[in-house]
Amino acid sequence: MGSVGDINWRELRPQSFANLELKAQGAGASVYRALLPSAHPAEKPLMVALRKPRITSMLALDRFEAEIRLRSNLSHPNLLPLIGACTTPPNYCTVSPWMNGGTMFDALHAKSVKMSFERLISLTLQFAKAMAHMHQVNLVHRDLKTANILLDEKWQNLMVADLDLAVDVNELLYAASRNGGRALHRGPSNGRLSHMVGTLVYMAPEVLQGRPHSFAADVYAFAITVNEMATCAVPYVDRKMPVPELHTVLETRFNEVKLRGAIVKNNLRPVLAHGVPEEFRRLIEQCWHPVPEQRPTFHQIVSQLETLLSKGSQYLSQFSGSTFDTDEHLAATSKNMKIDDTNIIFDEIKASALKPRKPIWELCDQKSQNPGYCRMEVETSNNNLEITAALSSTCGDRGPDRMEDRSLVETELSGLPNHHLFAVFDGHGGQACSEFAATHFPGALFRAWSNEDSTPESALIHAFEDVDYAFLKDSSMEENSGCTALSALVVDSTLFVANAGDCRCILSRKDGTVLSLSKDHLATDPAEQARVLARGGSVSVSGRVMGCLMVSRSLGDRPFKRYISSTPDVVKHHLTNDDDFIILASDGLWDVVPIDEAAALVRSTVRVPDLAAKRLALKAVELGSDDNISVIVAFFGGNVSFSYLEN
């Protein structure tokens, strides 16, 4: 085969490769082994790894492009080099030399490789040198783990791989400084600079708490990884826990939330390697110290490892590598086990939905004890609004098997006084996305507003983005359904309306004035169209994104995610005695009933929300609406009735 050194980085085409063989497939990418002809005809072809990422969002495309920029300028013997790439759709891929030894994770837990302690130190030193080089050029890896370390055929040399999450540390710090010193909340609008990327068991406690990733966080992940190499134990499986919990700590989502809490609050770490020199144990402990500033730098780590290695084979042979100091059952648990990048956002949404709630203003009082944390701006009043609401929904002419709308009407949200949540999710391409959103939106909202730096507006934005992220990650790659989303959150006497798509919310005042509290996000809107085009998309003559999707913002819609946004616009309105009612509805109503007429119909109906909602839905059917129709009417200071109607 040819050598890597003889091939310069270049743009490649799919037809450049021969003998493609699928070797691995995951949620984010597929990896093939292939032969790449040399740039010089007289030389033999090179065995390469072709990694094809799944580009289903703008975030994924940003990461792909950033990885190519970064790796094309990065060179070190222990960092996986970039030979070439295909940067034109739909054949995105990166090309690297093929490493016959596979991943360190598979070597430890599937192939049960036993290495001498001297070999362990040699590989650890290579690992540290690669990271010292990355940090020297201001790059943080953010996803160090044994699955991202590749070995040669004889397991004598390693390369650090998977640099798609690597980023300049200054970018992270700048982004955090604009966000009050905290890392960006994970969500599509924050792209590759968001925190909480990586794999839970290797993540530093400060990252789990929301602080930006740093050099010290890489050092922490290095320690977890090296200890795994020394023990042949999957991190935290080697803890002395009850057997039923051991089996689920890395597989059951709720238990991962518990594990995260133990790492952060109780300084839980994997059992430290035995049968190794005391200075090696101390180094690992220093590297996973709970205080980031107390951890050594990689240059210091390299120096300590070189000192240890210089003691020679006679000294090092006294110690064993791959020591697993626990019972046989736990050793068997580690064998062939896999650690996946879990859907942490979804885990926390579900856990948050089960927790006791506190009113937003109580959270604000707690946060106010920490200067600079509380940014809640909620209008409170002794004259609390008496809110009654109802939903009416109908499948319309589409038939009951095509009912894709879902809605929420929650007065006294989760038993909280003066907290009310109303939402409409207008599904398309199936009901999976709208069903998921309606089920998990309250939990996402609870999760978001418990953040130290949250406001009601930011909580709604994060809830939209998190539900979108969780749905795309939790559903299969073949699930392409989506939904537009509209929510109205009433906290005491303040109304917050969040919208992504073409559902609408209007407010009618007692003098007959009608206010639109949402804006349609259609691809025909100049600002929305410009954003779609800026993301590399197109808008057809008929006003559809990529010739298919009418809206420019929605949840789900996997095939179009790179071009559209799930981030809502949020409108804040202080309610007064002059405000009468609001109407939230899917476009099945608004396509045939103008907003002024809708308000007039409600005003001319008995002040009972279910009757008003039903009248609007029936009016839309009467006027020939060919879409699903969902209508919520909420009266301020009205009758006490509440019901749910579905035709």
Image (tube, rainbow, N blue to C red):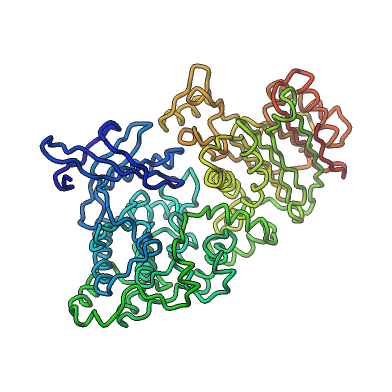
Q: Report the number of discs.
A: 0
Report the residue that reaches farthest toward the left.
42
Depth check, front residue: 145 or 595: 145
- Whether residue 145 is visible to the viewer of this picture, yes or no, is no
Asked which quadrant contains residue 94, the reply is: top left
Asked which quadrant contains residue 61, the reply is: top left
Q: Position of residue 423 (x, y in %)?
A: 69, 40
- Residue drawn at (24%, 35%), measured in percent from left and top? 11
- Residue drawn at (32%, 55%), measured in percent from left and top? 102
- Residue drawn at (79%, 31%), measured in percent from left and top? 511
- Residue drawn at (24%, 74%), measured in percent from left and top? 118
Taking the image as shown, residue 269 lies to the left or right of residue 280, namely right
Taking the image as shown, residue 182 lies to the left or right of residue 122, namely right
Q: Position of residue 550 (x, y in %)?
A: 56, 25
Quadrant where the C terminus lies?
top right
Quadrant where the N terminus lies?
top left
Q: Position of residue 238 (x, y in %)?
A: 47, 72
Q: Position of residue 91 (x, y in %)?
A: 35, 33
| Relative height, residue 132 to residue 269 (above, below) | above
